[in-house]
Amino acid sequence: MKPRVCFDDPVPEAGFETLCTHFAEDPRAYAGAAVPPIWQSSTFVYPDAAAFENRLSDDTPYFEYTRGGNPTTSMLEAKLARLEGGTWGECFASGMGAIGAAINACVHSGAHVVAVRHCYGPTRWYLEHIRRFGVETSFVGGCTPADFAAAMRPETKLLYLESPTSGYFEVPEIEPIAAAARERGITTIFDNSWATPYFQNPLALGCDLVVHSGSKYLGGHGDLVAGVVVGHDQQLRQRIWREAHLGGATLDPFAAWLLIRGLRTLAVRMRWHHENALAIARMLAEHPRVTRVHYPGLESHPQHETAHRQLRGYSSLFSFELKEQTRAAMHRFLDRLKLFHQAVSWGGHDSLAIGGTLFSVDADNPAWLIRLHVGLESADDLIADIRRALEA
Ligand SMILES: Cc1ncc(COP(=O)(O)O)c(C=O)c1O
């Protein structure tokens, strides 16, 4: 069992930004250091022989071995749990580590899963991969509660949601969809990497587990890979921890420390990402060389109203389609960009762009989709870069 670490709430009604800075931290506990240290130790010393003998009892207060728990990582887990409105968090070595563990904790051979069709590619591949263990998944393309209810079966154990979805940034109606799952005893997992807890709290919308790629906005500087699962239910916690401890994809304390540092500026970064992305999405939506912009913050987005109800703001990853739907036109645009580097991932300080047909709905008539991650540079410079690439 993982050590139970209790963190006092310094200011019980504290706001988001205050929690990011102060929650779960107590400089008096580590020699007055204003910035907490990194407990970069694989093993921890027992106080006596009895402590080792009793280590498997449920309420051991000791850290034992970093694969099963570490003070730096526990501090991060407490912060993330508090920010998401959960009671516990479990960190992993990557977002996929967290997603795989959360899925494994909810299914067994013969179980059925309902998932959003445009979930993150490797999540979809993982759900297809576990078919060989007797777990079948139905992927749902629509966004309404009826679309999801129609896919649920008596043997459905897991509902896997992402909103906005990857690629097309569709926004399913989370509250009624999660409520329908709960009525049927189905556990809901929600990937909240896009919105972060600053803009959206899936537990408050009725989901059971929230997963994040910490490699994105939570870290925020493109210098770490991490993941987390947050929840309320203690039985689920025990199952997730077993996945972490036995699967071994636990987070290194240094990456945990970098993530704690990233969280301190999460709110200000997200506000800036929101403003920059909205300015660029609006410019693209009006540009004669662009046909469609898939950004839920735009009034023209098909689920903008739902997005407006569910989210407190919008982050900065979205896609668009050029009027000239050819590979050559897409390559020309991408290769002319100077400030947007061509790279996967997103959520950092720098702007990124990639393009392809990865998320195409119609295999016979693929759409060339360009995905932008808008960073923290000056919006005017980014807009000029895009205009130059579109108009050259
Ligand atoms: C929506 C989403 N979820 C999860 C992940 C996986 O996270 P990681 O790369 O940290 O494993 C990604 C990565 O791009 C993602 O885009």
Image (cartoon, helix red, strand yellow):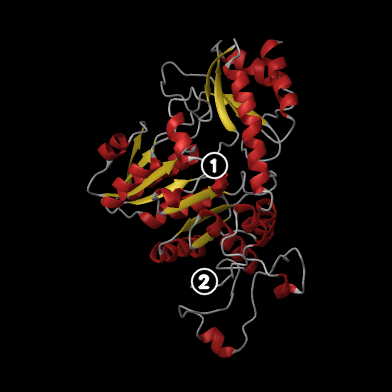
Mark 2 / mark 1, whichever is N-terminal: 2
Q: What residue is at 39 percent from the left and 65 percent from the top?
A: 235
Dot 2: element: loop
Q: Are marks 2 and 1 in contact (CB under 8 Å)?
A: no
Identify whether 368 is placed above or below 318.
Answer: above
Which quadrant of the structure image shows residue 371?
Answer: top right
Q: Which mark is residue 195?
A: 1
Mark number displayed over residue 2:
2
Q: Nearer the viewer, residue 232 or 49?
A: 232
> x and y percent of residue 59 in the render?
48, 79
Residue plotted at (43% across, 61% down): 232
Query: Which is more foreground, mark 2 or mark 1?
Result: 1
Q: Secondary structure at mark 1?
A: loop
State the count of labels: 2
For this rendering, which residue is in front, 206 or 363? 206
Indicate the quadrant where residue 347 lies: top right
Q: Ligand 1: which quarter?
A: top right
Q: Is residue 280 visible?
A: yes
Structural distance between the alpha carbons of marks 2 and 1: 29 Å
Badge 1: few (under 14), some or many (20 or more) residues near its Cα, within 10 Å? Answer: many
Query: Which amino acid type is shown beneath numbered disc 2?
Result: Lys
Which residue type does callout 1 highlight? Answer: Ala
